[in-house]
């Protein structure tokens, strides 16, 4: 094993294959031909066992669950899943993504393009190790292909690393779990708070539809008339000098970034330089602006937390100076809107454009009611934003601490004594 020899006291050299109690993939149950012959996919409610895929790991995933019948489940017996089992995707853009099997009280089995791992008492430690900087780097060394990166089970097993004694493994995992538990609690609170806000919105304004006789002082407006709507822009991708993955210029939002955030967006994977902003006249999105995706993935929403930028698939609903409307109000209206009803073709991806977005009708209450609503709803959004800010801080601290713990640079006793 060609590892560096500055190994912390008590740590040992090992590999994924040596440490794993079980390591299997979907194809391990047979050839693709036999899989096709023996495995039948079914819709929700018709199957015996749930197929767990990377898509099912996404809490915002709204697609249909996939099941298999009992015969298929028995054919796939090598990859039966139990709640908490470790799974890593090994094909595609998200190869290397690690997640746990969900806590479902039904039979589960591993989906395609994934590897099931069991490390016994080391499960929790390895869950964090493989997500850390060192773990991700090691996984990248066994990947092949650029357009569709992937790695196989055999090469994955060969990954070598150093590991502490089991007592220290458990202590490290416990420290990191404290961060994750707090993050999960705050995210659950935010989900409850947003549901509360949506309920209040519907109670106040949901009984009136376009075409109904409205109370005195109420009216119908169009998004394009009531908001200053701008569309994002992307500099030429081949001119890489305009883009950066390090803090410079301003944060540049993609639909993927919107999918990774909640009600408020703090982080983006890329920045645009100040030179790019000026040269290509990129519209700046002011702080506390509701933004909406309307291409490729339609209907994603979030609110900016600082001046930001976006690509051309995202519309920015800027509040006009003389308007009594608010970002919170329009966020809740759009959150409840059926975007599928807007398209003129069978494919919403090609049916929605900025003209359609600007032409969306919505009911506007009289100013007095809007002011009362804002007073009631704003503290809820402030709490969501505060929770989100805490999540950002906790995540940053955890991610900074993780590689230091996994390399032995920081020992658990030092944390406890700090």
Image (tube, rainbow, N blue to C red):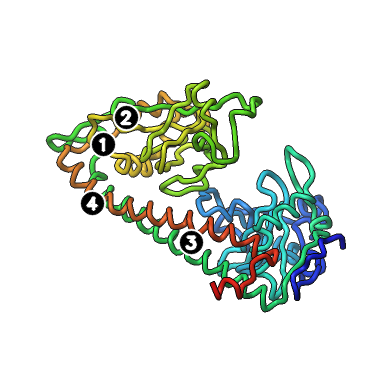
Residue 409: quarter of image: bottom right
Could you tell me how far apart the alpha carbons at marks 4 and 3 are, in whole angstroms?
Answer: 26 Å
Q: Is residue 46 left or right of residue 331?
A: right
Res 183 label: 3
Say which element carries label 1: loop
Residue 347 visible: no
> In percent of the image, x 27 and y 52: which residue is there?
200
Q: CA distance from mark 1 to mark 4?
A: 14 Å
Please tell me the numbered disc located at residue 193.
Answer: none
The numbered disc on residue 325 is 1
Which quadrant would the C terminus be assigned to in this image?
Answer: bottom right
* Whole-percent x, y for residue 141 in the image: 78, 50
Q: Nearer the observer, disc 3 or disc 1? A: 3
Q: Measure how far apart labels 3 and 1 are at the Cα level.
A: 32 Å
Do the numbered discs 4 and 2 sit on residues whose CB atoms are within 8 Å? no
Residue 237: x, y in percent? 62, 27
Q: Position of residue 137 (x, y in %)?
A: 72, 52
Which mark lies nearer to you, 2 or 3? 3
Q: CA distance from mark 2 to mark 1?
A: 9 Å
Crowd around label 4: few <14 · some 14–19 · many ≥20 (10 Å)? few
Callout 2 crowding tier (Cα within 10 Å): few <14, some 14–19, many ≥20: many
Q: Is residue 47 visible?
A: yes
Q: Quadrant of residue 285?
A: top left
If you read the primary sequence from the N terminus, does the residue marked by circle 3 or circle 1 appear first? 3
Q: Secondary structure at mark 3?
A: helix
Query: What residue sits 37% from the left and 37% below the top?
Result: 289
What residue would you read off at disc 4?
Answer: 376
Q: Label for residue 227?
A: 2
Q: Are discs 3 and 1 less than 8 Å apart at CB?
A: no
Mark found first going from the N terminus, 2 or 3: 3
């Amino acid at each position: 094993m060609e590892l560096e020899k500055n190994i912390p006291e008590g740590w040992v050299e090992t590999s994924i294959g040596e440490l794993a109690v079980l390591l299997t993939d979907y194809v391990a149950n047979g050839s693709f031909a036999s899989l096709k012959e023996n495995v039948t996919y079914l819709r929700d409610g018709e199957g015996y066992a749930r197929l767990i895929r990377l898509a099912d790991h996404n809490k915002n995933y709204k697609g249909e669950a996939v099941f298999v019948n009992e015969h298929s489940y028995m054919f796939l017996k090598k990859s039966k899943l139990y709640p908490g089992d470790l799974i890593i995707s090994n094909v595609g853009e998200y190869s290397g993504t690690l997640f746990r099997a969900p806590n479902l009280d039904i039979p589960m089995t591993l989906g395609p393009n994934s590897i099931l791992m069991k490390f016994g008492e080391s499960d929790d430690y390895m869950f964090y190790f493989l997500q850390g900087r060192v773990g991700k780097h090691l996984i990248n060394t066994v990947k092949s292909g650029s357009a569709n990166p992937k790695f196989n089970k055999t090469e994955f097993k060969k990954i070598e690393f150093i590991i502490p004694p089991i007592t220290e493994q458990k202590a490290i995992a416990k420290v990191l779990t404290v961060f994750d538990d707090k993050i999960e609690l705050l995210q659950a609170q935010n989900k409850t708070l947003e549901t509360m806000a949506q309920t209040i919105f519907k109670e106040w304004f949901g009984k009136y539809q376009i075409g109904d006789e409205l109370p005195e002082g109420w009216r119908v407006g169009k998004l394009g008339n009531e908001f200053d709507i701008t569309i994002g822009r992307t500099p030429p991708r081949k001119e890489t000098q305009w883009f950066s993955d390090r803090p410079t210029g301003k944060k540049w939002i993609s639909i993927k970034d919107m999918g990774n955030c909640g009600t408020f967006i703090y982080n983006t994977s890329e920045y645009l330089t100040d030179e790019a902003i000026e040269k290509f006249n990129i519209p700046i999105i002011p702080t506390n602006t509701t933004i909406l995706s309307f291409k490729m993935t339609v209907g994603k929403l979030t609110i900016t937390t600082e001046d930001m930028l976006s690509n051309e698939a995202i519309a920015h609903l800027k509040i006009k100076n003389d308007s009594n409307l608010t970002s919170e109000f329009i966020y809740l209206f759009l959150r409840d809107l059926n975007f599928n009803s807007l398209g003129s073709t069978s494919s919403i991806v090609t049916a929605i454009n900025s003209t359609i977005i600007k032409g969306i009708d919505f009911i506007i209450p009289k100013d007095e009611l809007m002011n009362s609503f804002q007073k009631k709803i704003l503290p809820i959004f402030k709490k969501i934003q505060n929770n989100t800010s805490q999540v950002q801080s906790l995540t940053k601290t955890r991610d900074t601490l993780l590689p230091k713990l996994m390399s032995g640079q920081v020992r658990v006793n030092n944390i406890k004594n700090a």
